[in-house]
Image (cartoon, rainbow, N blue to C red):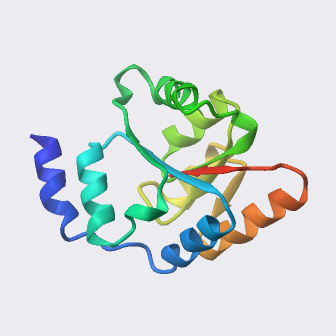
């Protein structure tokens, strides 16, 4: 029932201003982009289709965090044969920060989502940003520091 309600709300969701430019830049630079969500893959794909974003993402995975989001991430990494050193995890919840850290992922917390910036900061993400363009700058700086991140997950 919750998934059905979310599906109905998907129609009215609009992307974060400026995010499409950042995603297009990542894609043109050869990054793999993925979505790992507790929402249904059908709902996420509907949002991507409604906003003409389908071609941007290499994978959309859905996983129930009943047994912990860290296990969902671990399974995701294994499924896609990803090295944690090559992944930047972008999240908007405190549990994203905790789960990413438990899987040795660099984690970027974004203040435009579910949790307030002050709350996110208490969980000590590797980075905390307010605007999409900051993500682009951050990833560019990581690449220059020899941390070759190949995958950005949302």
Q: Which of the 4 quarters of the picture holds residue 78?
A: top right
Compared to residue 141, the image places residue 95 above or below, namely: above
- Where residue 66 appears, as percent x and y from the top left, is 34, 24
Please name the residue shown 70% across and 50% down the image.
150
Figure check: 104 above or below 51 = above
* Vertical comparison of 29 with 65: above or below: below
Along the horizontal axis of the image, is 138 left or right of 22? right
Residue placed furthest toward the top: 67
Picture quarter containing residue 67? top left
Query: Looking at the image, which residue is at 50% across and 38% down?
Result: 95
Q: Position of residue 29 (x, y in %)?
A: 69, 67
Q: Name the image quarter holding the N terminus.
A: top left
Left or right: 16 in relation to 73 = left
In the image, 59: left or right of 63?
A: right
Residue 50 appears at what percent x and percent y? 26, 70
Q: Residue furthest right?
A: 145
- Is residue 131 at least partly visible in the picture? no
Where is residue 33 drawn, in percent x and y? Answer: 55, 54
The image quadrant that residue 46 belongs to is bottom left
Frontmost residue, 63 versus 95: 63
């Amino acid at each position: 029932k919750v998934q059905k309600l979310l599906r109905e709300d998907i129609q009215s969701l609009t992307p974060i201003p400026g995010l499409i430019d950042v995603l297009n830049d990542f894609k043109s630079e050869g990054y793999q982009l993925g979505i790992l969500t507790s929402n249904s893959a059908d709902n996420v794909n509907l949002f991507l289709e409604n906003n003409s974003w389908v071609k941007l993402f290499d994978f959309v995975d859905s996983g129930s965090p009943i047994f912990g989001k860290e296990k969902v991430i671990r399974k995701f990494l294994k499924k896609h044969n990803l090295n944690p050193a090559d992944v930047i995890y972008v999240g908007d919840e405190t549990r994203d920060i905790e789960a990413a850290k438990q899987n040795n992922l660099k984690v970027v917390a974004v203040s435009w989502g579910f949790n307030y910036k002050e709350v996110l900061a208490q969980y000590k993400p590797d980075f905390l940003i307010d605007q999409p363009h900051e993500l682009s700058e951050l990833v560019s700086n990581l690449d220059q520091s020899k941390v070759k991140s190949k995958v950005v997950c949302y």
